[in-house]
Amino acid sequence: MGRRFEPVWAHFYAIVRSVDKPNLPNNFHVLFKQGGSKLRILVTGGAGYIGSVAVALLMEKGYQVAVLDDISTGHIESIPEGARFVRGSVLDQDNILNALEGCTAVLHFAGKSLVGESAEKPDLYQDVNVNGSKNLLVQMRSKNVKKLIFSSSAATYGEVDLNPISENSKTSPTNPYGSTKLQVEELISKECAEHGLSAVSLRYFNVAGALKTQNGWLAEKHDPETHLIPNILKSSEENPVRVFGTDWPTYDGTCIRDYVHVIDLVEAHVLALLSLVEPGHKIYNLGSGRGYSVKEVIAASDKATGKSTPYVSEVRRSGDPAILIADIAKVKRELGWAPIRGIQEMVADAYRSTEAFF
Ligand code: UDP
C-alpha cells in the first residue's frame, strides 16, 4: 500500500525552502530527517590536516563530533572547543571504544601518509594503517556502529597506463603506503559482506588548500614537508623549491597531478556519509578531473603571492609517475559531488594560511 502522508519533516522542509533561507546547509532536509545535531560522528585523525577540516565543517553543519587522535603528527590546537577529544591511538582498543561512545558513524582519517617514509618504515605503516583500521572495525562492530567513510588514496593504483584513472583501473600500489590503503579497503569490503557494515572509501588525488576558521587556519603543516604547494610557498633564494624532473613526457617536462581543494574534498565525505543506507562498500575517486604540471602550480603560486618562486631543477623523484588524473564521473553521478574550487583558490588559501606560520 502506498503512503498516504508525507512525513512531517518533509512539509517543514518544503516551507523552509519556500521562504528561501540562504544560510541553510544544502543537506538540511537530511540532517533534520535524521535528527540533525543528535548525530555524533567519530573523526579519527581529527587533529590532522584533512581530519581537522572535516571536524570544523561537520560542526558547522550541526553534527556533534568526537575526535580520536594521538597527536603524533596532528595539532592539538586544531581541535575546536565543542568536539569531544580522546587523545589516543587506533592501536589501542580501549581508546577506540571510549571515542566511539554515542557515535553513529566514523570518518577514518587516522594513519601514516608519507610515501617516502612508508618505504623506509613499512612495518610502521602496516601497523598503524592496517592493524589500526582492523581494531577500529572490530570495535565498531562491538558497538554496532554501521557507517564508515575511509580516507583512501590514489596511491592504491600505482603506475597507470591510462589517464584519467577510473575506479575500475587495476590497483597495483608501488609503495607500502598505497599497499596499506588497499589492504584496508579489502578489510572494509569483508566487514561489509560479513557483518553488514555500510562504507565508502574515498581515493584522494592531490589535496591542497586550507580552511579559515574563527580559531585560525587549518592547513598542511608537515615536518618534514614533502608536498609541492607548501614547499613552493616556503621557498626562498637560499632554499629554492626542487622541481623533481624536467624531462618527463609531458607538455613542459614536469609531472602532472590532479589537485582538489580540501573543503571540496570534505564536502564529498559528508555526501558519502549521507549516502550510507544499505550494507556494502563503495569506492570513489576524489580529484578535479584535470591536471596541472609542477610548473603550472608554480605559476599559480606566483600569481597568488605576487612573487616569483625560486626553484631549481632536480633529478626525478623515485616512485613518481609522470601523470595522475582522476576520472570523477562516478562520484559526480552517484553522490552528486563536483569540486567548485580551482587551483588558483587552492594556492591562494594555502598562501594566506602560511602568513600565520612563516
Ligand atoms: N614535487 C616537486 N618538488 C617538491 C615536492 C613535489 O617537484 O618539493 C613534485 C612531485 O615530484 C610530484 C608533484 O610535485 O610530481 C606532487 O608531489 P606531492 O609530493 O605534492 O604529491 P604526490 O603526487 O607525491 O602525492
Image: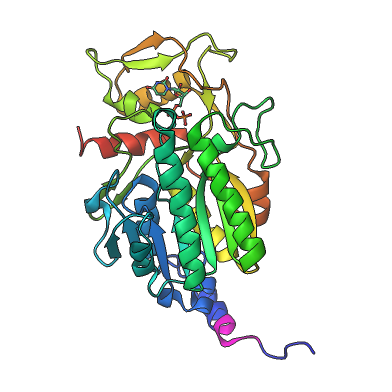
The main secondary structure of the magenta stretch is helix
Task: Give x and y (percent) for residue 277.
Answer: 62, 69
**Magenta stretch encompasses residue 94:** no
Q: Nearer the viewer, residue 47 or 270?
A: 47
Residue 28 visible? The answer is no
Q: Residue at x 66, y 42 (%)?
A: 167
Task: Give x and y (percent) for residue 171.
Answer: 64, 36
Task: Give x and y (percent) for residue 138.
Answer: 49, 63
Looking at the rendered image, the quarter that the C terminus falls into is: top left
Looking at the rendered image, the quarter that the N terminus falls into is: bottom right
Q: Nearer the viewer, residue 124 or 302?
A: 124
Task: Pick out the residue farthest to the right.
Answer: 1
Residue 23 visible? The answer is yes
Q: Residue at x 40, y 50 (%)?
A: 110
Q: Residue at x 47, y 53 (%)?
A: 133
Q: Which residues are magenta?
A: 6-11
